[in-house]
Amino acid sequence: MLTRRIKRTATILLLATIYSNYAFGLDEFKSDNMLFSFFIFLLLITLCAFSILLFKYFQQQKRFSTLLISEQRLKSTVEGSGDTLWDWNIRTGEIVRINDKFNMDSAPQGKFIPNQHCIHPQDIPMVERILKQHFAERTAFFEASYRIKNNMDEWHWVLDKGKVIEKDTNLNPIRMTGIVRDISHLKTTEERLNLFAKCVESLTDAIAIYDADYRLVDLNPSYLKLFGGFREQYLNKPFSLPGYDGRYVEELKAAVQETEHWQEELKLSNANHVLLPIEVTIDEIKNNHGQITNYVVVFSDLTERKKAESQLHDLSNRDRTTGLPNRNLFFTNLKKLGQQSTHHALLVFDLDNFKKINDSLGHQLGDSLLAKLAMRLNKLARQQDTFYRLGGDEFALVMAGTNDIHTITKTAKQFLAAIATPFKLASHELVITSSVGIVLFPEDGNTPEILLKNADTAMYHAKQKGNHYLFFNDGMNEQAVKRLQIENLMRFGLKEDHFVVYYQPKMDIKSGALVGMEALVRFITPKKGIIPPNVFIPIAEETGQIIDIGEVVLDKACRDVKTWIDAGLFDGRVAVNLSAKQFSLPDLTTRIDVILQKNQLPSYFLELEITEGTVMDDPKEAIAIMRSLSARGIHLAMDDFGTGYSSLAYLKQFPLNTLKVDKAFIDDMHSERGRNMVDSIVTIAQNLDLHVVAEGVESADQLTYLEALNCQTIQGYYYSKPLSYEEFTLFLRNHHAQKVVRPKLKVVANGSER
């Protein structure tokens, strides 16, 4: 505006000058002095006016610059605050925003609320209500918290505060200004505080908050539930513990001041005046300057936890089936007893063949038997003695304060007699036996572990006598160490392939032709040399290692036979012993199938030898397994027939192909009684249409008698000792080349054939 005035004044001055010059040229009668004076006058007037206008221009520019600076400062302040300033023309709906972080300028306006579409639908009714109250002058300011969506479709909590600043003549609001602030972080904090408050309110533990002077500020409902009363009676009261004097409380406060934390289990009265175990915890609360502002005291009722701990203690230290103390408590109590340096005795026993009862009659009846046994034996123990169930069918009796042999043996005999007394359960009369191993403290060991190990060793030796008791001695321990060494050697031998298969020929008694062979395992170690089968096989059967050993033998035998068949040296069957543990495997047939397929050997060439003791453990199950094997084309032979307790009723049901006469009967043929026994076995086999194999034949006399009985096949040192793979390959080649009908007797040393 000022610039336009200056331009206008300059134009007037120019026009005046032109006009004066024009007038001077026309008006001759005017003098030069008059014209010059007039010109000077006009110039002065023009200069004065121009100076005034120029002064006003600079003054206005200064004000404008100051206004710009103020506006920039205001804008920077608003941007720095993060708030949004708004000016709303209520009549037209136009709204102007400064620092609009939610980018709502381009959004359509609502009918009543600016940017209604941006506000959360659930919050719109509340905003409308508060805005109407302000328009009706019921509130000095409009103030509302609600959720608003930004241009990224994200919801933010905002605080919107404004005021009507202009009204029309009818006092209707026409203009309103205000500020919007993002309070999402405050809402999050508020929600967390509310959540924390609700958690404190709902905690089952009683909580009390005290100020820096230990005066009660607040408490939760659980506090009143535990100690009774009402809230007001506790507020502003000093900290105290019912039943504890002031001196103890002061000591407690001193401990808190020193460590900032205190915790201890106390006995406090509840609302019903009952003493309860309560854990009291006190913690200091400090502000940002490290000053103590409050103390939080938590009272935790331990009653239920104590009950649970007691129940858990019983569960972890009591056997559920018999109610007796278990193995955990056995070691704990025995250790305590050993620390008293008093003499005591430990008797350990288990039940013979208890697994058969479980397998045949079921675990439920087996558990009932154990419970009845525990009740029966517990009555025999002295008052100072403790009876334990160590697990399974293994029990222990700790006789405290005595090492008297007479007292101990009397108790052992009573236990064995009580165990052997028949049990009547579910229409069954069960008779069981046991063996007892006995150790003395401190003579046989000074720790529970050593005592139990030595007692187990004594029990193991007692079992060999059957229904007997034995005291531990050093000789037993030496045998146990040797047994452990054999276990370790077998474990290493399986890993390093130290189990080798030897083969003993089976010959036709009339033609002298080779009809098969028996695969026999040999355990050859690098340092100990050959370990006899009668040493390692019983241990392998007890430990279960016989399963792995049996699979190794079967695999190698199938591999070797397949090699000899492919070479045209052999067309008979190889007999492989099947242990009792292998026979009881649920996947036995699958395991055998896998080995046959692996070596591509037809099942026709395989014969499995099973002892009569194995099949008689559970004849019905044995018949099912044997039929499954026989259906695959595998021949089955009963080994060691006559040495166990075979039943002829079951024998005729077994799908057998061969019956083997045990070496013990062959050795006894020098007597008439022995010859009659072999005659009976051969007759039974022939009547059942079974092939007969006599094993352990070593002399011509034995051969002659067996031939007279029409025994078809023999094996033994008369023909050959067990041979290695290389030796048997040479044997096959020689036999194949010579076609010997009946070789001469070979004089060889006696040896084990298994």
Image (cartoon, rainbow, N blue to C red):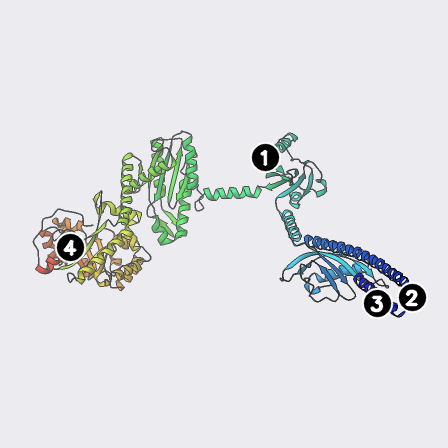
| Vertical arrangement, residue 505 with respect to residue 236, above or below | below
Relative image position of residue 672 (x, y in whole percent): 12, 50
Residue 605, percent across and down? 21, 61
Where disc 3 sits, the SS reads helix
The reply, left or right, for residue 594 in relation to residue 727 is right
Image depth: mark 1 or mark 4 in front: 1
- Count of residue discs: 4
468 versus 248 height, above or below: below
Q: Going from the N terminus, do you reach mark 1 or mark 3 first?
A: 3
Image depth: mark 3 or mark 2 in front: 2
Q: In the rendered structure, which amino acid carries the disc numbered 3?
A: Ile
Horizontally, residue 165 falls left or right of residue 249, namely: right
Residue that numbered label 4 is attached to = 728
Distance Cα–Cα, label 3 vs label 4: 148 Å
Which quadrant of the structure image shows residue 238? top right
Secondary structure found at label 1: helix
Residue that label 2 marks: 30
As measured in the structure, the alpha-carbon distance from the residue carrying label 2 to the one carrying label 1 is 115 Å
Q: Position of residue 328 (x, y in %)?
A: 43, 41
Residue at numbered disc 1 = 259
Amino acid type shown at disc 4: Phe
Q: Quadrant of residue 604?
A: bottom left
> Could you tell which of marks 1 and 4 lies nearer the N-terminus?
1
Out of 227 and 16, give the one closest to the viewer: 16
Mark 1 is on which residue type?
Thr
Q: Which residue is mark 3?
A: 18
Camera-side residue of 213 and 380: 213
Q: CA distance from mark 1 to mark 4?
A: 85 Å
Horizontal relation, residue 193 to residue 733: left or right: right
